[in-house]
Amino acid sequence: MAKLLTAKCSRCDRRFRAKSKGDLLNHIRTHMWKEHEDWMRRRVKAGLRKAKKAQSEPHMPGNPFLETLKKVLNPTWTGFAERPIIEKLTGRPYEQVRAEVLDAFVAQLFDGIKKL
């Protein structure tokens, strides 16, 4: 005999039982939309607002070409071997030195590019 799965509504603590997870979720979902429709609508609208806000915010500040170029020139997998050597020679954190060198390299590269 299959074991019955149980769950409860997060709003009114009503308990539901079913033989499969899919049936259990279907019972809860049907109950939520029938009994707690206003709460469900608020949740959906809040999620839509959050998605719209995240989509409207630029995820790469500044020049997107510059950020892409930095990622190409400086992959995340580099740095594990030279880290102790650079920190010992400069006396500064590796990330700070790497960022400054990369910025200088990109600046030199952009100095050579002229607008048409």
Image (tube, helix red, strand yellow):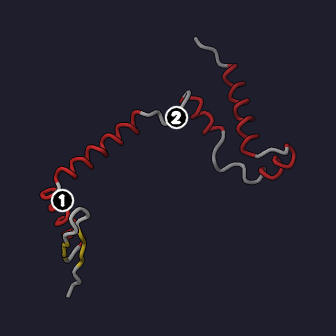
Q: Quadrant of residue 8?
A: bottom left
Q: Residue at x 22, y 52 (%)?
A: 40
Q: Secondary structure at mark 2?
A: loop
Q: Secondary structure at mark 1?
A: helix
Q: In the rendered view, would you say 28 is above or below 6?
A: above
The crowding category of the residue bearing disc 2, from other C-alpha atoms within 10 Å (few below 14, some 14 to 19, many at least 20), is: few
Q: Nearer the viewer, residue 30 or 102?
A: 30
Q: Amino acid at mark 2?
A: Met
**Of the residues under marks 2 and 1, which one precedes in the sequence?**
1
Q: Residue at x 24, y 76 (%)?
A: 6
The furthest residue to the front: 12
Q: In the rendered view, would you say 19 is above or below 97?
A: below
Is 88 on the left or on the right of 12, as rendered? Answer: right
Which residue bears the numbered disc 1? 32
The furthest residue to the top: 116
Which of the labelled discs sits on residue 79, or is there none? none
The crowding category of the residue bearing disc 1, from other C-alpha atoms within 10 Å (few below 14, some 14 to 19, many at least 20), is: some
Q: Residue at x 72, y 49 (%)?
A: 79
Mark 2–mark 1 Cα distance, whole angstroms, equals: 39 Å
Is 100 on the left or on the right of 72, as rendered? Answer: right
Which residue bears the numbered disc 2? 60
Q: In the rendered view, would you say 36 is above or below 70?
A: below
Question: Which part of the image, by quadrant, shows the N terminus?
Answer: bottom left
Q: In the rendered view, would you say 94 is above or below 116?
A: below
**Foreground: disc 2 or disc 1:** 1
Q: Nearer the viewer, residue 95 or 67?
A: 95
Residue 70 x/y as whole percent = 63, 35
Q: Amino acid at mark 1?
A: Met
Residue 61 x/y as whole percent = 53, 32
Residue 72 x/y as whole percent = 61, 38
Q: Are marks 2 and 1 in contact (CB under 8 Å)?
A: no
Q: Residue at x 35, y 42 (%)?
A: 50
